[in-house]
Image (cartoon, rainbow, N blue to C red):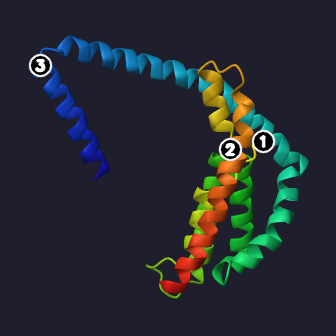
């Protein structure tokens, strides 16, 4: 559906541009935007490699495991049933830890594994349980201690202090995670 909407927006913009005599402007805008996109991606690759290396060091040094030990008791309190399964909890902890450290690419396989493990205990395989919904909320609104992607984008765009976003990101994502869990718990009582 989204592909159709984006296609209609793009096609209508091009048609209106051609009908109003701005065909040359559209062509220039398309070339300039693709050029700047490629430049940004090349700058991001270097920064992402750096942060992935730093996060790999954190993982190898045991930092992520220490964070996981802190998370387990908290997660045991908020999950009811399927999320307390040891395999599911392990995948949940690793997913959230990777997200907290800003390596969401590494978090994705753990997130998929967590949902698969919770679905094994799900009596209605085609319906998400409350624990699954809560996990998705936590995954989407996870606290970010090191927002590597945002820092990388800010650095690639020429920011003088790309790391300045860390404290606002912790506050914003922490608030989002707390509100998300509270709303998820409240809604689970009614639905």
* 89 is higher (above) or lower (below) than 112: below
Q: Residue at x 70, y 76 (%)?
A: 78
Decide which of tag 2 and tag 1 comes sooner along the chain: 1
Viewer can see residue 10: yes
Q: Residue at x 69, y 27 (%)?
A: 162
The residue carrying pointer 2 sits among few (fewer than 14), some (14 to 19) or many (20 or more) residues within 10 Å by Cα, namely some
What is the number of callouts on the image?
Answer: 3
**Is mark 2 in CB contact (under 8 Å) with mark 1?**
no
Q: What secondary structure is found at the residue carrying circle 1?
A: helix
In the displayed structure, does residue 20 sit left or right of residue 38?
A: left
**Is mark 1 in CB contact (under 8 Å) with mark 3?**
no
Q: Point out which mark residue 20 bears.
A: 3
Q: CA distance from mark 2 to mark 1?
A: 18 Å
Q: Give the image quarter of residue 70.
A: bottom right
Q: Residue at x 9, y 21 (%)?
A: 19
Decide which of tag 1 and tag 3 comes sooner along the chain: 3
Q: Point out which mark residue 169 bears.
A: 2
Q: What secondary structure is found at the residue carrying circle 3?
A: loop
Q: Nearer the viewer, mark 1 or mark 3?
A: 3
Which residue is label 1 attached to?
55
In the displayed structure, does residue 130 sit left or right of residue 81?
A: left
The residue carrying pointer 3 sits among few (fewer than 14), some (14 to 19) or many (20 or more) residues within 10 Å by Cα, namely few
Residue at the extreme bottom of the image, as rendered: 123
């Amino acid at each position: 559906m989204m592909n159709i909407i984006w296609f209609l927006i793009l096609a209508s913009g091009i048609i209106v541009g051609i009908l109003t005599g701005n065909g040359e402007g559209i062509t220039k805008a398309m070339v300039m935007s693709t050029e700047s996109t490629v430049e940004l991606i090349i700058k991001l690759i270097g920064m992402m490699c750096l942060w992935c290396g730093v996060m790999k060091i954190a993982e190898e040094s045991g930092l992520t495991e220490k964070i996981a030990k802190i998370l387990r008791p908290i997660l045991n309190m908020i999950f009811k049933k399927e999320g307390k399964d040891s395999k599911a909890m392990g995948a949940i902890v690793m997913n959230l830890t990777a997200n907290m450290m800003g390596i969401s690419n590494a978090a994705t396989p753990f997130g998929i594994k967590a949902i698969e493990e919770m679905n094994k205990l799900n009596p209605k395989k085609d319906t998400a349980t409350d624990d699954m919904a809560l996990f998705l909320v936590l995954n989407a609104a996870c606290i970010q201690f090191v927002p590597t992607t945002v820092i990388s984008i800010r650095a690639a765009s020429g920011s003088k202090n790309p790391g300045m976003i860390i404290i606002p990101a912790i506050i914003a994502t922490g608030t989002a995670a707390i509100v998300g869990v509270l709303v998820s718990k409240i809604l689970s009582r009614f639905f």
